[in-house]
Image (spheres, rainbow, N blue to C red):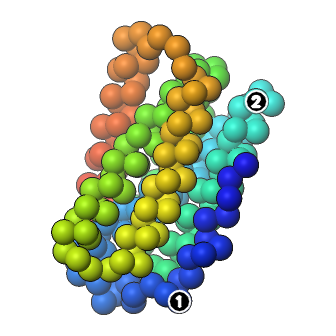
Amino acid sequence: MNMPVTAALAVEDMPQAQALEKRLQGDLRSDHAGETGAVWIYRGILALSRDPEIRTFASEHLETEQQHLAFFDDWLPPALHSKLLPMWRLAGWMLGAVSLLGGRRGVYLTIDAVETFVVEHYQEQIEYLQAQREHREVRAVLRRFQRDEDHHRADAAERGSGKEGWIARRWRSVVGEGSRLAVVAARRL
């Protein structure tokens, strides 16, 4: 069972998002967009799957993603939200729905691929902030969320373990590249 992530993370302890440097604002915009997409991935899975194992998996991870999204919603003013949020919701829902075409392994592979990207994305931001020696509270949030996402990745990897053929490797590549392009767009818009 996932621990509530926001319990020790108070928005009141965070710096004013509007006062942060533009690069960091772009990173946080992409984080908010990514958490939005993650919520909708699980909603897409839950809308179409009747498999009890998949529904339990998706429900548990959805709870954590909703907590992450609520934190960003509370912290970031609407002006710092991605203008493409409707697209991120649709894309997330569709990715969740399409993952079901591969059955359980398709869902687990998709979540593993998405979360592998997210863990690396958060790591890049943490390293940037460490090099700047700024915003310890932002780093703490990113580390906390990164741990949660890594838990999702590990859970999906364990459940979907097995030999990956060329289709699975190609799907993993498509999901990773799609995530990378989404970050590029969300940082700007």
**Is residue 83 at all visible to an observer of this figure?**
no
User: Disc 1 residue type?
Assistant: Glu
| Residue 180 at x, y percent in the picture | 30, 46
Q: Residues within 10 Å of mark 2 (few under 14, many from 20)?
A: few
Marks 1 & 2, CB-CB < 8 Å contact: no
Residue 166's place in the image compared with 22, above or below, is: above
Q: Amino acid at mark 2?
A: Glu
Q: Nearer the viewer, residue 175 or 82?
A: 175
Q: Which mark is residue 12?
A: 1
Q: Residues within 10 Å of mark 1 (few under 14, many from 20)?
A: few
What's the residue at 49%, 87% (across, down)? Answer: 13
Q: Nearer the viewer, residue 29 or 111?
A: 111
Decide if residue 57 is on the left or right side of residue 95.
Answer: right
At which x and y percent is residue 113? 43, 34
- Name the residue nearer the viewer: 84 or 117: 117
Residue closest to the eye, 72 or 119: 119
Q: Residue at x 47, y 11 (%)?
A: 163
Q: Position of residue 108 (x, y in %)?
A: 57, 29
- Residue 119 seen anywhere in this rendered image of the structure: yes
In the rendered image, which residue does mark 2 sit on? 53
Q: Secondary structure at mark 1?
A: helix
